[in-house]
Amino acid sequence: MKNDFFKDLKKEILEIKDRYPHLADDSAFVAWFLRAFITEDEEQAVKSLTGKTGDKSCDAIFFDHDNRIVFIVQGKYHSNNQVSEPRSHIIALSTLGRSIASDSVESFKALLNKANASVQEGFEESRRLIKKSDYQLVLRYVSTANISDTHIKEAQSNIDDFDNIRFETFAYIDLMKLMQDYIEGAAPPIPTISLPVQGTEVFSRSDRDKKITSWIFTMGGTEVGNIFKDKGVRLFARNIRGYLGNTNINRVMKSTIETEPEYFWYYNNGITIVCDKAEQRKDGGSNVIKVRNAQIINGQQTTRTLALCGKNFAEVLVKLIEIPRDDESNNNQYRHLISEIVSATNWQNAISQSDLKSNDTEQVRIEREFKKLNYFYIRKRMTKREAVRYGANKYSNKINKEELARAIAACDADPYEVRLGKDRLFEDDIYSKLFNGRKVSEYITIYWIYRYVLYHSRGDDRKVHAKWHVLNLIWILIKQDFKKNTYRDHFRKMVEHDKKYSKELQPLEKLIRLVFDLSLAFYRKNKRIDGKIQEARDFYKHKNYHKAFYDFYRQSAIKRKMINSKLKQLIDNIATSKEN
């Protein structure tokens, strides 16, 4: 896992430096941490960097106005974890926090004295927000090396007398876990939350072999709903779906909460939570379980419905599972166990094969990379309102994974597979061929060609059923030219601004019309099968007809010449656009 971690981290750093060449490795590392675990906005992350001489133990200052938090980050990037951070560096960050939050003007002026201008400005704004607007101050020391527990405790004790300061460290082991969450789409993590136990009964089980500890207990419905109100959709990052809205099951659930809350515990399957660490604490009449990095992997619909109902008298069964993630073996166990629990327990609302691939690392990568290009990728089944909650309205283009899968399958597989239904495309034997780690610009190119083909298929049932074979042939003819990154990028620019490039895109539209005409001729010639004329909807359901269609194209000299002419015009126009 260590080698994978540093390899993955180096890749992230290089990608950031490719977009921001002026950044050193250390600064790019801090920018990655900010983007992955504090803000999703990379531009804001980079703007938050200080990164200059006289930075006074501060590499970044980020103001989270939504949550009223000032983040001050000190980062140390090492190429391995064979070193330990010195005590003086750890203590310096906590001392910096004291100076910003304290009432002592002299102490704060001393802090500003040797800081550069931009850091001075950041410290002054931090102090103003903390003093006048009641913001919290969170100090984070982030390093790929090791950090002594003794140094951490000393730094934390240095700010014990401040209720509005938190001191947190992220060393190699912590970052290794966070990298897994980041790659699998579950970052930033949920901070520690408290789960109040209803009543006194808590069943606990420890698996010494697997080092997994589990608890089963009851929570009040209002308290479960409040977790979502407080932490939001990040609670469900490892769930395979978004909120499904007003389904029949969710309506019945809501009715039970409102009219028969005393029976809800018996009717409902409850919720399943996984976490990195859990600790039960009893204090007088209080009985709570403190949970770090919680994820609700079963029971999202229950949790969201309880939140919608507000204060209620329902009770909910909770299963809490603490799974260690300290090395490669434990990480694999964590990933496998969550996948199996999700598959086994999320059946109260119907589950599909495509749902089960929602959290696949390739789907997470596509989602993250698409955002950089102003595309919102919907990898989980959810309502439109839920998509807006996830930020869909911020992006100019929206693509869901089922639509993308159909487009890719039509291009790179037998279009027959597309006709078998969307879930077929998410079965293991074909899924890995479609979502194979290709560059996201290729995914987007395929998607846009599909969109144009789809548009030209409307109004004629024969074309509707032929469209997957038409798309397949066009991709066969065009994919060699689109192996060039610059051609894919400039084609994307053209289709995203189609009004501006309408003339340059005319060859594409004519090309598609010609291939549809060819498909009609292909159908007319071959529609009689075993003495019976087949309708187009049945004709295109046969295996390997895309090969026969390609052969038909090769044999149609006149049509082939016309198609190739439009194809050349399109490629020439893309090349011209590239030069401009």
Image (cartoon, rainbow, N blue to C red):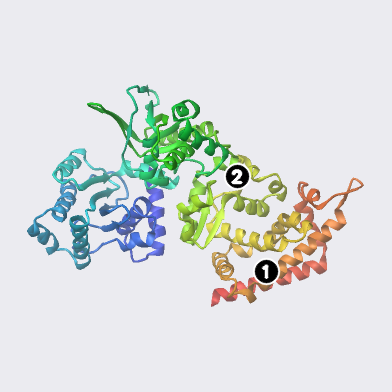
**Which residue occupies the foreground of this view, 118 or 179?**
118
x and y percentages locating residue 204 in the rendered image: 36, 23
**Disc 2: CA contacts within 10 A as few (<14), some (14-19) or many (>=20):** some
Q: Which residue has dot 1 on it?
A: 508
x and y percentages locating residue 462 in the rendered image: 79, 57
Which residue is located at x 54 percent, y 46 percent? Answer: 381
**Which residue occupies the foreground of this view, 25 or 277?**
277
Asked which quadrant contains residue 469, the reply is bottom right
- In the drawing, does residue 262 fall left or right of residue 137? right
Q: Image height check: is 94 above or below 116?
A: above
- In the drawing, does residue 221 fall left or right of residue 282? right
Q: Image height check: is 574 above or below 130?
A: below
Task: Specify the farthest residue to the right.
Answer: 531
Residue 425: give its label.
Answer: none
* Residue 245 shows in the view: yes
Q: Which residue has dot 2 on it?
A: 431
x and y percentages locating residue 484 in the rendered image: 57, 64
Residue type at the position of mark 2: Tyr
Which residue is located at x 41 percent, y 63 percent? Answer: 18
Q: Quadrant of the N terminus?
A: top left
Q: Image height check: is 364 above or below 427?
A: below
Q: Quadrant of the C terminus?
A: bottom right
* Residue 322 shows in the view: no
Secondary structure at numbered mark 1: helix
Q: Image height check: is 465 above or below 174?
A: below
- Ranked by sequence position, the earlier of labels 2 and 1 is 2
